[in-house]
Image: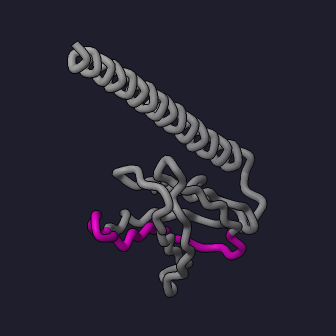
Amino acid sequence: MIVAPNVAGVNDSVLVYVEVFPRVEGKDIVIQYRLNDSGWISHTLSTNEYGWCLWKIKLNETGYYEFKAVWEGDQYYLPNTSDVVKILVRASPLRVEEYENAITQVEKLSREIVKKSRLLNDTLKEKKALEEKVSDLNSMVSELKAKVSGS
């Protein structure tokens, strides 16, 4: 799990990124968060076709927020809980350097997501190409068997 930026101002948004392994689509992930050790609040997201989900949340109180992702498991996969990620929300406005750092963190997260999506797209394209080749080979085998049985 990644939460970016790790320092934000009141009423600023943060991004929560979670990915599951193996990459499975349509699985519910519960994001739990809390402010200053209060009770956990839950928000449920579903994984996309690449096995990850992204949530943008606006935080409107100062203090330390903690986030964790909870996967309850299913008949194939065991349950799991991520490590807790802690961020600070301070009274706005933040210093310019803090906003610049926040921008850097969010841009880094964006680049990582794009990179993973491209890798997965390449993998899916390769899988499809291989499936087509296997289909072509199976067709050839069938044609050859037909020729053999017709002789």
Q: Quadrant of residue 73?
A: bottom left
Is 69 magenta? The answer is yes
Kindly identify the residue that appears in the image at 21 percent across and 16 percent down: 148
Tell me, yes or no, if residue 66 can be seen here. no
Q: Residue at the far right: name it.
A: 93
In depth, the one of 32 and 101 nearer the eye is 32
Is the residue 35 above or below the residue 39 in the image? above
Question: With 101 as the anchor, is 120 left or right in this view?
Answer: left
Is the residue 63 above or below the residue 96 in the image? below
Q: Residue at the far bottom: name it.
A: 39
Question: With 57 as the anchor, is 46 left or right in this view?
Answer: left
Is the residue 131 above or below the residue 98 in the image? above
Quadrant into which the N terminus falls: bottom left
Question: With 49 as the anchor, is 151 left or right in this view?
Answer: left
Kindly identify the residue that appears in the image at 48 percent across and 64 percent down: 86
Question: With 99 as the anchor, is 47 left or right in this view?
Answer: left
Tell me, yes or no, if residue 147 can be seen here. yes
Quadrant into which the C terminus falls: top left
Is 81 magenta? The answer is no
**Residue 140 percent location from the top left of the image:** 33, 18
Q: Residue at the far front: name it.
A: 151
Color style of the picture: one colour
**Residue 124 percent location from the top left of the image:** 46, 34
Kindly identify the residue that appears in the image at 55 percent across and 41 percent down: 113
**Residue 110 percent location from the top left of the image:** 60, 41
Q: Which residues are magenta?
A: 59-79
